[in-house]
Image (cartoon, coloured by chain):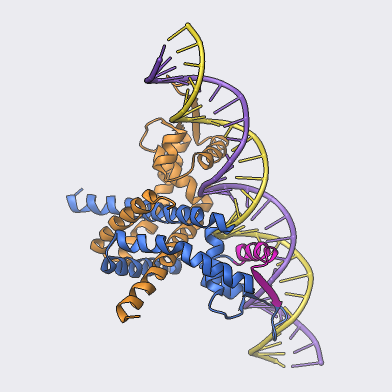
Chain colours: A blue, B orange, C yellow, D purple
Amino acid sequence: MSRHTDQLSALKSQLPLALRGAYLAMHRQSDARFEKYGVSAEQFVLLAALSEGEALTQRELAKRMSSDPSTVRAMLVLLEKQGLVRRCPHPTDSRARTATLSTAGKRKFRQLWKAGESIRTQMVDSLTAKNAANLSRMLVQLAEALGEMQLE
Amino acid sequence: MSRHTDQLSALKSQLPLALRGAYLAMHRQSDARFEKYGVSAEQFVLLAALSEGEALTQRELAKRMSSDPSTVRAMLVLLEKQGLVRRCPHPTDSRARTATLSTAGKRKFRQLWKAGESIRTQMVDSLTAKNAANLSRMLVQLAEALGEMQLE
DNA sequence: CTCCGAACGTGCGTATACATACGTTCCGGC
DNA sequence: GCCGGAACGTATGTATACGCACGTTCGGAG
């Protein structure tokens, strides 16, 4: 086993754990930060996806969140109960339901966006802007490659 | 707002989503890959942490997995029920319990390691080895920076 | 030796993540 | 117009992720 092969092998086992570790760390920070607003990290992602103002179907929302329709439904039920989100029948497709932010939801999102600013800043600053840009690009690339993989 | 500031701002909002997207994609791939062995992606991580052969306390195990002691306990209960893991009283500290792989657990882990090889390979190959090494390094750096953040 | 704070595991409650199965609606081919 | 497959949402079950409260044990200060 050559030295080069060893390094590659080590890299292959470290990269997944590094990805997992970074994600979990970010998730925990976000949850802690948003807790006093009564919102979870995942709920923030959902609200952010809706914050563009468009009315999205649950399916489309799930796609944009890299999430699961079934999970999104559960989240919407909770958020609707809290009055942050409205679900209306789709204007033309009666199978679908659209989700939009309520006024309270928009206000809440603005608060959350501010509250999360220091996390976003810390993430970019802990690397450099240039490295962070590379990181972001590589992560997207990675997600695409993994998403296209078949079960062989 | 200068152009430079706009770019930085966009980066700050993209990076978290990119990290989340990549992690979830990896997690889904892993779950799908390990499903026929009756093991989840997270359980694989736990088994891998124990595969060094050391007997770890649940706390130490949680630390190495970047995970939560409470979660680790639930996982151990399931894995013990499946006969992949043994939990024994700690030799000197009667508060603690140690976890080790059973023979079946070791065998299972070897199977899983092979089954996951294509994922690890795909992750590194979808970038280049050099970029993957950088990515890994940056992710570790990111996790550290986030882990050390206080609530301000 | 005693006592108190810290560390370990446990149990419980809530929110995700996802598969799977199911009912309803849509739409393209006929 | 009919029909069968595809798309959408719903419902249920299992496994994570994590906070929090609790009981037990450890270890050091006095």
Locate the N terminus of chain B by quadrant: bottom left
Q: Nearer the viewer, residue B139 or B91?
A: B139
Question: For the image shown, how many numbered marks are present on the structure?
Answer: 0
**Residue A101 vertical position relative to residue B130 in the rendered view, above or below:** below
Q: Nearer the viewer, residue B129 or C2?
A: C2
Residue A79 is inside the magenta segment: yes
**At x 37% / y 73%, what residue is drawn?**
B9
Residue A148 falls left or right of residue B142: right
| x, y percent for residue A130 | 26, 69
| x, y percent for residue A136 | 35, 68
**At x 36% / y 56%, what residue is drawn?**
B120
Q: Which residues are magenta?
A: A69-88
Which residue is farthest left?
A: A3
Q: Nearer the viewer, residue B142 or A148?
A: B142
**Residue B40 vertical position relative to residue B95 in the rendered view, above or below:** below
| x, y percent for residue A121 | 36, 63
Is the magenta region chiefly helix, strand or loop? helix
**Residue D26 vertical position relative to residue D16 in the rendered view, above or below:** above
**Residue A126 vertical position relative to residue A138 in the rendered view, above or below:** above
Residue B15 is inside the magenta segment: no
Q: Nearer the viewer, residue C27 or A113?
A: A113
| x, y percent for residue B91 | 43, 20
Give the quarter of the image for residue B128.
Answer: bottom left
Q: Report whether residue A33 is seen.
A: yes
**At x 35% / y 37%, what residue is drawn?**
B52
Q: Report whether residue B122 is seen.
A: no
